[in-house]
Image: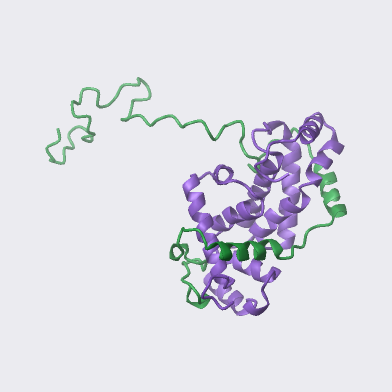
Amino acid sequence: MSNRDDLRRDTDGFLDMDQFEAAELAPETYEALRDTLIGAELPTPSAERFDDWVEHALEADPDAPDTAGLVPGETATDESPAPPDPPWDEDPSTGASDFADDPDGIDDGPAGDDPGDGLT
Amino acid sequence: MAAGESISATERELINRARGGDQAAFASLVSSHRTMLFTVCYRILGQRQDAEDATQLALVAAWRNLGRFEQRSSFSTWLYRIGHNAALGLLRKRVPEPAGDELERRAGQRPSPADTVADADAVRWALAQIPTDFRAALVLREYAGMSYQEIAEAEGIRVETVKTRIARARRAVAALLELEPGGER
C-alpha cells in the first residue's frame, strides 16, 4: 500500500487494521522500520529525575494493595489450563444435570416449551 | 538485561535485598531499566507528561508488589508489563480515543516523509494512527523486546492473536511512514 491517504479508517478514526496483511514484512522493509522506530529520538527523563521518582515510590506503603491492577498476576499462573466447561448446565444446589435422563444429550429447552423440532 | 533473558545472579541478589526492604537495592534494580520503562509508556501514550506519570505509577506498583514477583520471567519483563498496564490505564482515563475529526486535524499536521527518517514526530504520529491494542503489542515487541508468549500473557490474548496484531501493526506503520517498496521513499 503506497499511498497513505488511501488507507481506510474505522469509526473511531484509527486505521482499519483489516486492510493490512498479517504477513511478515520484507526483510529490508522491516529493517528500515526497526531503524526508524528505534532511531527516533525520545524525551527520556534524566537519571536525576528518575531517581526522584524512585525516591517517591519508596515512600509508598509496601503493604498497600494493588487496587489499580497494574501488577501481572504471576501467582495466578497464565499457564494453568482453565477448567473445562461442563457439558451441560448443572443445578448448583445438587450438581445434578438437567438432562441426566435425556438420551440424546441435546438441550431441548424448558419443559412444556417444545418448539416442535422433533428433538424431544 | 533484555526482556526474556534469565535473571542474573546480581539481579537476583538485588531483588532479594529489595524484597527485604533494602531501598538502595530497589533503586539500583530499576535504574538500569529507566530508559526502556519510559519508552514503553511513552510509545503507548504518545505524550511525555502522561508517560512520566505512567512511569511513576509503575515504580510505585513495582515497589509495593515486589514480593509477588516470582522470578518466572525476567525482572525487566515484569517491570515493562507494569508500565504497559499503567500506560493503558492512563490512556483509558485521560486521553479520549482519537475521533475522526481529531485525526483529520492531526493528518493536516503530519510530518512530511521527506524528513521523517528517525523523526520523533513521525514515529509518534504513525503509532497514534493504529488502534491501542495493536500499538501496545508492537511497542512490547519492538521496544521492550518481549517474546510473543510474554506479550500474550501481558495482553491476555492468544499467541496467534499477538502475531497477527504485530504483523498488521508493522505493515500499517511502514505504510504510514512510506517505508515499503513502492512507497514515496
Q: Residue furthest top?
A: A94
What is the tally of numbered marks visible in this picture? Answer: 0
Residue name at image x 56 percent, y 76 percent: B104
The reply, left or right, for residue A82 in relation to residue B116 is left
Q: Position of residue A74 (x, y in %)?
A: 62, 34
Q: Residue furthest front?
A: A28
Q: Which of B3 and B25 lies nearest the eye of the viewer?
A: B3
Quarter of the image with the N terminus of chain B is top right
Q: Position of residue A13 (x, y in %)?
A: 51, 68
Where residue B17 sits, quadrant-wise, is top right
Q: Which of A113 and A16 lies nearest the eye of the viewer?
A: A16
The chain displayed green equals A
Q: Which of B121 and B184 lies nearest the eye of the viewer?
A: B184
Residue name at image x 77 percent, y 33 percent: B15
Q: Position of residue A40 (x, y in %)?
A: 70, 65
Residue B127 visible in the picture: yes
Q: Is residue B151 above or below residue B68?
A: below
Q: Is residue A62 above or below residue A38?
A: above
Q: Is residue B6 above or below residue B47?
A: above
The chain displayed purple equals B
The reply, left or right, for residue A81 in relation to residue A98 is right
Residue name at image x 66 percent, y 50 percent: B144
Residue name at image x 55 percent, y 74 percent: B101
Residue B97 visible in the picture: no
Quarter of the image with the C terminus of chain B is bottom right
Q: Position of residue B160 (x, y in %)?
A: 47, 48
Q: Which of B153 and A95 lies nearest the eye of the viewer?
A: B153
How was the colour assigned to the protein in this rendering? by chain
